[in-house]
């Protein structure tokens, strides 16, 4: 193992963690294929290649346990000639999980998880086809059968092509030998004049087993001659020399076994390594397995891209500064001839800046496939667990999404998919009874819709019974009976996202839904996205996640409340209505507005108008926002227009409010706060008229406003 | 406070009649009070946010934080921008005075009576030229917002369950 300097080593490990994730993913994928296609020896080889890469990389990074485990697995998989591929797939799945857990442990420098279950499976796999004698050895020294590296295999090929014979020599070192380590050198010295050593196990300097030495040599001598050369009295107790090149045809035959009969039939040879090596030759010679597409891809730390994006954000602020200054300048000096040139240059700069922004954002975009690819394995596992047949169909994997978003929605997605399998899809018997195919199907799809990315999870299960949800909500006290009568179907369905609805165990039986859906919604809202449900009883349920393209920059509508500036994401604004104070009606202490044919609940962001002054005649602006299926009108004082905002985070700990989700800086240096709409909707829905109407009006008033509206600083600041 | 370091370098500032101090290592810069954008629904001592050369920084009014009577901000007011745990935070003070070196031996632990209430962020009292300097613990000073939020959430949850119970 090479020792790196700390920094270098850390960098390398980081890289390894990333590539390893991909390797594990491929491992899962190949294992899934193998499970469907147990007879495909190429898949086993592909799995071995992956495991081999993991082994090598892990060793290079000094992760000995992982490297060892991978090594054992790789060895076990070489016995493909005599074991059923079905169980190999199972082992590969377990391995992927165990390796993943180990990686996670390495990463946070935590305690390594036990790899004992995996080791046990590997041993079973290795034992299956073999006689007792061999298996005993395997349990004692699991590293026993030598696996040659790709490099060594290449060397074999070279030697063969040069017309040499390649032999696999297994020597047993005499247990009474005084210096077992020197024995290795003695054998090598003996062979040196007449044979070329291509590889040796255990490797030089390895403290491992000193009872056995396996060599891979190329020579023009015969097997007998080599045997004689190796036999050193009192040092070497046994020598077995087997030709490697010659075994090829036999190995090929053994490598493509009948899937069913093969576990039963005993292995043709007690010494598996030689046919195996030959088999590997065939595998190496195949050119198809080396994927060459990684050539043009750079691996860049996301932080660096974020830095660039931040700088672009600053530039955009700078652009508005310039724009504003120019407008003022134009007002001051309306006749200046240079104005045209300035304005041309600025238009040019602005165009390039937009391109730059788009390009940088594109760097952050990754196809949702990166997220989707984990689900086939998961669906399989969960389906197996609950004893159902479920297929997964995916489409729109190429849809791009901001990487940070992708990472955040991974968990809610997992949740929804798991839910769909375990609760959405009915049992096979029930499906057949209802005239559906026994095998349930889950569709994952993703597409762009305007400024948003939509991800849908659809199952063709029993659907959600609205009546049962309503009954449950009543029982839970989430709803009064009069509310229940008033609410529409979509609103009732939305109740499953309420915290408290989910905690009850029996709800899963009744509605088939409900585990932690509130978490899903919380996450989506935090991302300025939303989630809604569409269901047809007995046929299907669709969860639709709507996400913004990116979190970094939004188009926003600016408005004023109490002369202070705020913004909301433009895509949440359905329309802007103008009305008079007299159009606002009071219904059970709620303020509502009749907008065409529907009644719109209102939220007053500022304070209510004084009862005597200009009551009834004042004009108001109402922003109609839509969150999911709900519509809400926000009364604001004045509109300020649209602007592209670069979102900056607020210090959560000191700000300590959920009403504001972020802030941005305008061209003139002013700070504008971005209103968190879900929080406002939430407050509105929690508002109970009997608690007084302080909640729904004046949401955006600060303490200063409330306590001392007359005071000077509040005014002076505007 | 490390005993290896015989002297502590403190930035002194006034809030009300008292002189307070924070370790100079936690100070980022001192700026005049710019336009402050008030944040609705934030804790009352949270004055708002400012634009510090493109960064949004929250500002706490120490007068309110310490329960001093409120006065109108004037030209002498400053914002101490302090850094703690990678976060920047502004503290509005009446005026920032000087850098004070206090021998570690001259610092007494804060009296038990200060452990509760609004002054729970005091780490010790330093004696300097016959004056007492109240040393502040950044962590506690800035944590309070989070604590408040938790409390609010707790109260929220209770209200919710109470409403559900009805």
Image: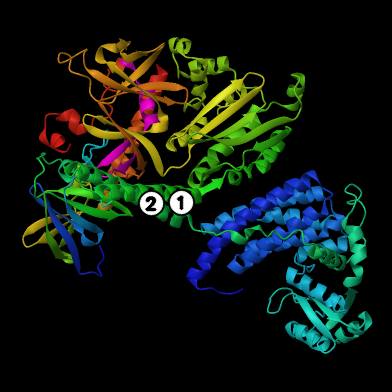
Quarter of the image that includes the C terminus of chain A: top left
Q: Residue visible at 75% across and 77% down?
A: A210
Can residue B95 be seen at all in this image of the molecule?
yes
Q: Chain of mark 1?
A: A
The correct choice, above or below, for A32 with respect to A2 in the image is above
The magenta stretch spans residue A586: no
Residue where numbered disc 2 is placed: A312
Q: Chain of mark 2?
A: A
Quarter of the image that includes the N terminus of chain A: bottom right
> Which residues fall within the magenta stretch?
A662-689
Judging from the image, what secondary structure is the residue with disc 2 in?
Answer: helix
Question: Image check: A120 left or right of B70?
Answer: right
Question: Image check: B117 left or right of A491?
Answer: left
The correct choice, above or below, for A449 with respect to A152 in the image is above
Circles 2 and 1 in contact, beta carbons < 8 Å: yes
Of A376 and B118, which appears nearest the observer?
Answer: A376
Question: CA separation, marks 2 and 1?
Answer: 8 Å
Residue B147, position as x, y percentages in the image:
31, 41
| Disc number placed over residue A360 in the picture, else none | 1
Q: Residue visible at 59% across and 27% down?
A: A542
Query: Would you call the spot at circle 1 few (<14 residues within 10 Å), some (14-19), or many (20 or more)?
Result: some
User: Which of the 4 image quadrants contains residue A658?
Assistant: top left
The correct choice, above or below, for A632 with respect to A256 in the image is above
**Residue lying farthest bottom?**
A193
Do discs 2 and 1 share a chain? yes
Judging from the image, what secondary structure is the residue with disc 1 in?
Answer: helix
Can residue A696 be seen at all in this image of the molecule?
no
Residue A8, position as x, y percentages in the image:
51, 70
Q: Earlier in the sequence, mark 2 or mark 1?
A: 2
User: Which of the 4 image quadrants contains residue A716?
Assistant: top left
């Amino acid at each position: 193992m090479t020792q790196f300097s700390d920094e270098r080593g850390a960098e390398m490990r980081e890289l390894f963690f990333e590539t390893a994730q991909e390797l594990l993913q491929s491992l899962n994928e190949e294992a899934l294929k193998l499970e469907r296609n147990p007879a495909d020896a190429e898949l086993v080889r592909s799995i071995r290649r992956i495991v081999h890469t993991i082994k090598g990389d892990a060793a290079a990074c000094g992760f000995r346990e992982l490297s060892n485990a991978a090594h054992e697995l790789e060895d076990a998989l070489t016995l493909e000639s005599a074991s059923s591929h079905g169980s190999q797939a199972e082992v590969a799945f377990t391995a992927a999980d165990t390796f993943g857990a180990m990686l996670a442990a390495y990463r946070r420098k935590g305690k390594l998880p036990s790899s004992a279950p995996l080791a046990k499976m590997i041993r079973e796999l290795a034992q299956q086809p073999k006689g007792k004698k061999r298996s005993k050895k395997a349990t004692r020294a699991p590293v026993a059968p030598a696996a040659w590296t790709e490099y060594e295999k290449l060397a074999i090929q070279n030697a063969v092509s040069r017309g040499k014979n390649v032999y696999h020599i297994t020597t047993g070192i005499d247990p009474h030998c005084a210096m077992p380590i020197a024995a290795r050198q003695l054998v090598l010295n003996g062979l040196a004049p007449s044979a070329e050593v291509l590889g040796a196990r255990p490797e030089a300097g390895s403290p491992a087993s000193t009872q056995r030495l396996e060599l891979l040599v190329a020579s023009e001598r015969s097997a007998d001659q080599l045997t004689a050369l190796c036999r050193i009295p009192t040092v070497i107790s046994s020598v077995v020399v087997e030709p490697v090149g010659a075994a090829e045809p036999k190995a090929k035959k053994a490598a493509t076994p009948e899937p069913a009969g093969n576990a039963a039939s005993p292995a043709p040879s007690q010494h598996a390594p030689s046919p195996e090596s030959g088999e590997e030759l065939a595998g190496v010679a195949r050119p198809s397995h080396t994927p060459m597409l990684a050539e043009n891809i750079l691996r860049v730390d996301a932080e660096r891209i974020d830095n660039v994006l931040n700088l672009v954000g600053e530039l955009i602020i700078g652009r508005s500064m310039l724009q504003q200054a120019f407008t003022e300048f134009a007002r001051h000096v309306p006749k200046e001839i240079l104005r045209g040139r300035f304005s041309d240059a600025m238009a040019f700069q602005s165009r390039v800046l937009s391109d730059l922004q788009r390009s940088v954002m594109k760097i952050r975009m990754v196809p949702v496939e990166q997220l989707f690819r984990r689900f086939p394995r998961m669906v399989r596992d969960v389906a197996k667990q609950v004893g159902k047949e479920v297929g997964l169909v995916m489409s729109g994997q190429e849809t791009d999404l901001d990487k940070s978003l992708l990472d955040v929605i991974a968990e809610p997605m997992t949740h929804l998919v798991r839910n769909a399998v375990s609760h959405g899809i009915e049992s096979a018997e029930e499906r057949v009874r209802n005239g559906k195919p026994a095998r349930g199907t889950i569709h994952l799809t993703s597409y762009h819709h305007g400024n948003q990315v939509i991800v849908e999870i659809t199952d063709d299960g029993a659907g959600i019974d609205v009546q049962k949800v309503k009954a449950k909500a009543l029982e839970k006290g989430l709803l009064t009976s009069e509310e229940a009568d008033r609410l529409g179907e979509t609103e009732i369905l939305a109740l499953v996202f309420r915290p408290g609805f989910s905690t009850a165990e029996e709800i899963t039986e009744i509605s088939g839904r409900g585990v932690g859906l509130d978490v899903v919604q919380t996450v989506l809202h935090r991302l300025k996205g939303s989630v809604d449900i569409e269901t047809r009883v007995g046929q299907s349920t669709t969860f639709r996640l709507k996400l913004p393209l990116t979190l970094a920059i939004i188009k926003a509508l600016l408005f004023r409340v109490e002369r202070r500036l705020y913004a909301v994401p433009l895509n949440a604004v359905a329309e802007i209505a103008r009305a008079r104070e007299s159009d606002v009606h009071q219904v059970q202490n709620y303020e509502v507005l009749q907008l065409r044919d529907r009644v719109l609940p209102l939220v007053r962001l500022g304070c209510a108008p004084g009862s005597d002054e200009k009551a009834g005649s004042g004009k108001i602006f109402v922003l109609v926002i839509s969150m999911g299926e709900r519509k809400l009108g926000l009364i604001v004082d004045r509109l300020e227009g649209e602007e592209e905002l670069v979102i900056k985070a607020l210090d959560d700990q000191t700000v300590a409010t959920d009403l504001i989700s972020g802030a941005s800086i305008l061209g003139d240096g002013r700070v504008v706060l971005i209103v968190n709409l879900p929080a406002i909707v939430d407050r509105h829905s929690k508002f109970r008229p009997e608690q007084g109407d302080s909640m729904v009006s004046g949401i955006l008033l600060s303490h200063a406003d409330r306590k001392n509206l007359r005071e000077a600083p509040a005014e002076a600041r505007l | 406070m490390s005993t290896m370091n015989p002297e502590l370098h403190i930035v002194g500032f006034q809030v009300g009649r008292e002189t307070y101090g924070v370790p100079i290592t936690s100070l980022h810069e001192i700026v005049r009070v710019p336009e402050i954008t008030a944040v609705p629904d934030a804790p009352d001592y949270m004055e708002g946010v400012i634009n510090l050369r493109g960064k949004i920084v929250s500002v706490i009014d120490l007068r309110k934080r310490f329960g001093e009577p409120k006065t109108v901000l004037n030209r002498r007011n400053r914002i101490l921008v302090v850094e703690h745990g990678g976060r920047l935070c502004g503290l509005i003070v009446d005026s920032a005075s000087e850098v004070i070196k206090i021998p570690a031996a001259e610092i007494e632990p804060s009296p038990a009576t200060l452990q509760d209430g609004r002054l729970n962020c005091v780490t010790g009292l330093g004696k300097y030229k016959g004056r007492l300097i109240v040393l502040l613990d950044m962590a506690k000073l800035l944590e309070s917002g989070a604590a408040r939020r938790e409390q609010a959430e707790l109260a929220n949850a209770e209200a919710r369950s109470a409403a559900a119970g009805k």
